[in-house]
Amino acid sequence: MQNIVVTGGCGFIGSHFIAALDPNKFHVIVIDNFSNSSPEILERLQQISLIKIDIFDIDITDQASLSKVFKRFNVDSVVHFAGLKSVEESHKNPDKYYYNNVAGTLNILSLMKQYNIKSFVFSSSATVYGNSSIQPVSEEMAMVATNPYGSTKIMVEQILKDFQKANDSVCTISLRYFNPIGAHISGKMGENPLGKPNNLMPIIMGAASGRVKALTIFGNDYNTIDGTGVRDYIHVMDLAEAHLAALSFSEGNTGNFFFNIGTGKPTSVLQLIASFEKVTGVNVPYEIKPRRIGDVDTSFADTKKVEQMLGWKASRDIMTMCADAWRWECSGLKF
């Protein structure tokens, strides 16, 4: 039985990752400060899986409290989801983002070194590529962030490179997510951000259910198929399974690695809305407003590297993503 620390384990992606773990192989130690999640997700996880979970209400910037957890358990690996993630907020409070995302990660790495933990999987982001004019985006392209949030991801990736070089028996893996959407097929878990949502799918849910008047589409004059922004949407359970593949890879390898995690298939905002309406039969009212500063027109992944090295490939399509997200919305199981 492996002891695995999952930071941010009650969040959208962290909770779905835990749901994908084999309860016969893993014991999960969740570290979460519930800034954008709820401890109630644990009850849902126990309905979905029999996995053993210990949970600690701790901020990753609290080194003393983190140390007590790592000292208590014989930790085999760390999967690090915890981090602030709003591009808009990062422009307003860059100091908050650098302190939480960078200093918090340094705290965890120091404990990995202290307790001789060899495996680390990091939640990075496709924002590290900035506004790339070359599509699809490959891992070898330069990292040039256009916002403080993206800069924190670049900084952590550089730290991991240097950390692994200094500790050559360790395996560090950065997974550069594109756009996770969808929900667990059970309808018991999904994306439910506290406060104002920043991601597209929760806003679509709000417009479809009538909780908000209309979805706002920022810009319809991009150089894309229909003028709206194009992204690479990936089902959250495909993303969870990518973490499983990375974790498995880390057990037999040393080095610093980084991979794109997406489908490799571009989808515009209007195409996503059309797919949602087709699979649910529900209309999504929307309005067009001017572009936001920093938004890119097109971003989708070159996934050859992850397919070849980790043997992982996304399997769920846009229709499945929309159907699962709507099932979660209709469940009424909000925190």
Image (cartoon, helix red, strand yellow):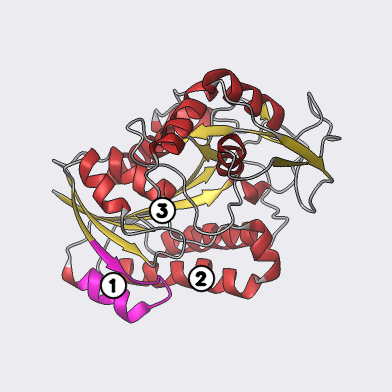
Tell me whether the residue at label 1 lies in contact with that at label 2, contact meaning CB atoms closer than 8 angstroms: no
Q: Residue 327: where, in percent of width, then height?
A: 42, 31
Q: Which secondary structure, mark 3? A: loop
- Crowd around label 1: few <14 · some 14–19 · many ≥20 (10 Å): few
Q: Amino acid at mark 3?
A: Gly
- Does 63 lie within the magenta span? yes
Residue 201 occupies which quadrant of the picture?
top right
Give the extent of the magenta segment: 55-71
Measure the C-alpha gap from mark 1 to mark 2: 21 Å
Q: Which residue occupies 75% across, 47% down?
A: 295
Residue 253 in sight in this render: no
Q: Residue 250: where, in percent of width, then height?
A: 33, 45
Q: Which secondary structure, mark 2? A: helix
Residue for badge 1:
114
Measure the C-alpha gap from mark 3 to mark 1: 27 Å
Check the image and report above or below for 59 versus 81: below
Check the image and report above or below for 116 versus 256: below
Measure the C-alpha gap from mark 2 to mark 3: 16 Å
Observer-nearest residue: 273 or 171? 273
Disc sitting over residue 278 in the figure: none
Q: Which residue occupies 59% across, 62% down?
A: 152
Dot 3 or dot 1: first in sequence order is 3
Q: Is residue 91 left or right of residue 226?
A: left
Residue for badge 2:
100
Q: Amino acid at mark 1?
A: Gln
Q: Amino acid at mark 2?
A: Asn
Residue for badge 3:
11
- Count of residue discs: 3
Residue 71 in sight in this render: yes
Q: Is residue 212 left or right of residue 186?
A: right
